[in-house]
Image: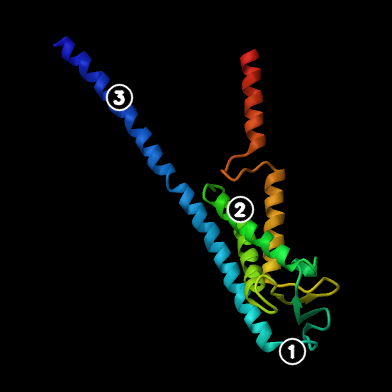
Amino acid sequence: MMVGVSTDHPDRDLSAEDQPITDLSKSASPTRPRRLAMLIAIAAVILIADVLTKVWAVAAITPGKPIEIIGDVVTFTLVRNPGAAFSMATSMTWILTLVAIGVVIGVIKIGRTLRSPWWALGLGLVLGGALGNLIDRLFRAPGFMRGHVVDFMSIGWWPVFNIADSAIVCGAILLVALTLFGFEPNGERLRSDKSNASSEDQGESK
């Protein structure tokens, strides 16, 4: 009888230990697709807003006749921009098109393993903005990969821009801030890991 009892207990302990391991693997698996879905959703919102506002701007704004919103400080002014965001690098349209394609591919590649919601937000903004301006460069006049981007928002002395430009800049600022503060795309924080490692080393030395 004593032998039967002793053989039963290890089986119960093993089954109790095995159950949490399977639960952890199941709970961790949905993390990656949720972040990728978040990135794609943010990019889609930016892209749709950018395309629709550009269609409106082309139809409603006459070139050279801005629509005043707050006097002449904030206006809707239709501009065809062959360059980058905020009318920079106007003579490098086809190069900027290739760069935009590279950005889109890179963001999607990173997004496949993304776990941080903040990185998903930043990359989603960049992806949506890059796609918005890329569509203009691919399909608008004067030709394929040489199309001019539609800009229409003007604030004071700042160059005329669009929603895609704003999304790219905001996303880039967020990504730089996350990097500076040590937040990784996988959701971990480098500085906290280093401090934990140093504290463990101090504990072992004692």
SS at mark 2?
Answer: helix
Where residue 39 sits, quadrant-wise, is: bottom right
Disc 3 or disc 1, which is closer to the eye?
Answer: 1
**Three-letter code for the amino acid on which mark 3 is drawn:** Leu
Query: Callout 3: 10 Å neighbours few (<14), some, many (20+)?
Result: few
Counting residues from the start of the chain, the first of labels 3 and 1 encountered is 3
Seen at 64% across and 60% down, the residue is 126
Name the residue at the right extreme: 157
Regarding residue 121, the answer to whether it shows in the image is no
**Residue position for label 1:** 62
SS at mark 3?
Answer: helix
User: What's the distance in space between the residues labelled 1 and 2, CA to CA?
Assistant: 37 Å
- Vertical position of residue 106 compared to residue 24: above or below: below
Seen at 52% across and 47% down, the residue is 113
Name the residue at the top extreme: 2
Counting residues from the start of the chain, the first of labels 1 and 2 encountered is 1
Counting residues from the start of the chain, the first of labels 3 and 2 encountered is 3
Residue 14, numbered label = 3
- Vertical position of residue 98 compared to residue 198: above or below: below
Q: Residue 193 at x, y = what percent?
A: 62, 32
Residue 106, numbered label = 2
The quadrant in which the C terminus is found is top right
Query: Callout 2: 10 Å neighbours few (<14), some, many (20+)?
Result: few
User: What's the distance in space between the residues labelled 3 and 1, CA to CA?
Assistant: 75 Å
Q: Residue 144 at x, y = what percent?
A: 65, 73
The quadrant in which the N terminus is found is top left
**Residue nearer the viewer, 144 or 80:** 144
73 with respect to 161 (left or right): right
Q: Residue 19 at x, y = what percent?
A: 32, 33
Seen at 52% across and 50% down, the residue is 112
